[in-house]
Image (cartoon, rainbow, N blue to C red):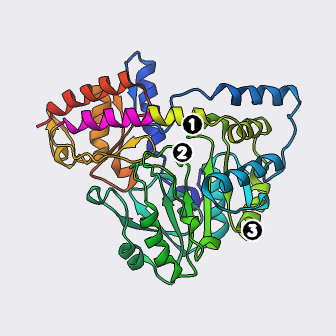
């Protein structure tokens, strides 16, 4: 008899990885699939970062690293925060982990107890609710629709807070919507949080360097709540280093210490070679980041234009990241032959099998009337993919 723990049985599989797997299965059968389901830059890691990793191997950085990360990388992150964000965090307040996903999970497991409520604006990244459930907390969702660019209001936040609220998870720029909160919008949310000293903020800023409205704004900048904010970031998106698995937090000392203690018991320190690569990313030439952002913005404009030409799709213009999240309610309830499209997940599967384009249904993100497409692929692939999607949708009635 196989009995999974209640903890594991409560979790849902990642729809983004599930769709990527289905896409790969079709590719293995020789089908020309354009994969727009995975949140991964299509660029190679910049040469100077790869060279630093090669040098680290030659210099024999092949032993265990400190649990919270090498001191030089923590210092570089501290200096980056001061230089780019005007935020003061000592190296002791930085904890480096095996990806921003581990960083997030460390924080949630460190501060959320059974019965604690965690506010998650929807649409949300698929793993947020699952991490909360893993910590035996209670996810509380606030829905923000496309009319508001998928951003919550201060009033919505105020109404969602209860005496049991422990954490607000805020992602800007956002996965899955690409929405970016302005300084004024963040300040208004901070004003609400100031009145509720028991509420902490986990600010997922992994897409910081991919925003199209200028300087990134962090909710940690507001003095009244600064000591209750944990910033989560890393090198995967801005430096095209997803496989290197380096993320980090900048946190109040007590949370940083807790995360370090937790990490010491189940993974220890992250890859020594990857940390030296990340050090080169933060200390080296930043032109690679700017160049990738220019390409993403051009692709954003292209995919928004092409999707906007498809009848029945409601498309907003994302201001960051590399996702677009069109509303597809018009197509729900339609069918082709005996195939019914009842949900956005049904629509995503239909698009994969009919158009050979992989995307993800919004159901997984708490937005059942939308689909997510990643435009972290070539202009040619974007053009070809959206033409295929258009033809497939025309066949529904």
Residue at mark 1: 289
- Secondary element at image label 3: helix
Q: CA distance from mark 1 to mark 2?
A: 7 Å
Residue 232 x, y percent position in the rendering: 61, 55
Q: Nearer the viewer, residue 366 or 83?
A: 83
Is residue 393 rendered to the left or right of residue 42?
left
Q: Nearer the viewer, residue 65 or 297?
A: 297
- Secondary element at image label 2: loop
Residue 302 located within the stretch drawn in magenta? yes
Residue drawn at x 43%, y 66% as measured from the top left = 184
Residue drawn at x 65%, y 72% as measured from the top left = 227
Crowding at dot 3, Cα within 10 Å, few <14 / some 14-19 / many 20+, comes out as some
Crowding at dot 1, Cα within 10 Å, few <14 / some 14-19 / many 20+, comes out as some
Residue 12 located within the stretch drawn in magenta? no
**Tag 1 near tag 2, CB within 8 Å:** yes
Q: Nearer the viewer, residue 145 or 71?
A: 71
- Prevailing SS of the magenta stretch: helix
Q: CA distance from mark 3 to mark 1?
A: 30 Å
Q: Quadrant of the C terminus?
A: top left
Is residue 236 rendered to the left or right of residue 310?
right
Q: Residue placed farthest to the top in the image? A: 30
> Earlier along the polypeptide chain: callout 1 or callout 2?
2
- Using the image, determine if residue 109 lies above or below residue 49: below
* Dot label at residue 35: none
Is residue 201 rendered to the left or right of residue 255?
left
**Tag 2 near tag 3, CB within 8 Å:** no
Residue 20 x, y percent position in the rendering: 45, 34
- Secondary element at image label 1: helix
* Dot label at residue 253: 3
Residue 59 x, y percent position in the rendering: 88, 29
Residue drawn at x 87%, y 38% as measured from the top left = 63
Residue at mark 2: 209
């Amino acid at each position: 008899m196989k009995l999974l723990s209640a903890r594991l049985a409560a979790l849902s599989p990642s729809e983004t990885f599930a769709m990527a797997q289905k896409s790969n299965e079709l590719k293995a059968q020789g089908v020309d699939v354009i994969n727009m389901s995975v949140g991964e830059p299509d660029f190679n890691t910049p040469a100077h970062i790869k060279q630093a990793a090669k040098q680290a191997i030659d210099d024999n950085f092949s032993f265990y690293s400190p649990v919270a990360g090498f001191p030089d990388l923590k210092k570089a992150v501290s200096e980056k925060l001061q230089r780019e964000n005007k935020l003061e965090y000592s190296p002791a307040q930085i904890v480096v982990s095996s990806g921003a996903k581990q960083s997030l999970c460390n924080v949630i497991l460190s501060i959320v107890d059974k019965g604690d409520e965690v506010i998650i604006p929807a649409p949300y990244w698929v793993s947020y609710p699952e991490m909360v459930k893993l910590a035996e907390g209670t996810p509380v969702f606030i829905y923000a629709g496309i009319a508001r660019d998928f951003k919550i209001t201060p009033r919505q936040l105020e109404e969602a807070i209860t005496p049991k609220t422990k954490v607000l998870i805020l992602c800007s720029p956002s996965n899955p919507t690409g929405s970016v909160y302005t300084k004024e919008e963040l300040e208004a949310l901070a004003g609400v949080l100031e009145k509720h000293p028991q509420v902490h903020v986990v600010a997922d800023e992994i897409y910081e360097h991919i925003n199209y409205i200028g300087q990134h704004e962090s909710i940690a900048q507001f003095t009244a709540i600064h000591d209750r904010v944990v910033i989560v970031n890393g090198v995967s998106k801005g430096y095209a280093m997803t496989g290197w698995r380096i993320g980090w937090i900048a946190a109040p000392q007590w949370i940083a210490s807790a995360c370090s203690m937790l990490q010491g018991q189940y993974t220890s320190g992250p890859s020594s070679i990857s940390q030296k690569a990340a050090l080169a990313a933060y200390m080296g030439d930043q032109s690679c980041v700017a160049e990738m952002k220019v390409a993403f913005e051009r692709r954003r404009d292209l995919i928004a234009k092409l999707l906007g030409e498809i009848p029945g799709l409601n498309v907003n213009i994302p201001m960051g990241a590399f996702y677009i999240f069109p509303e597809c309610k018009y197509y729900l309830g339609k069918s082709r032959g005996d195939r019914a499209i009842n949900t956005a997940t049904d629509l995503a599967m239909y698009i994969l099998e009919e158009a050979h384009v992989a995307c993800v249904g919004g159901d997984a993100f708490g937005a059942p009337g939308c689909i997510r497409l990643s435009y972290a692929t070539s202009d040619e692939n974007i053009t070809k993919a959206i033409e295929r999607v258009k033809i497939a949708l025309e066949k529904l009635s």
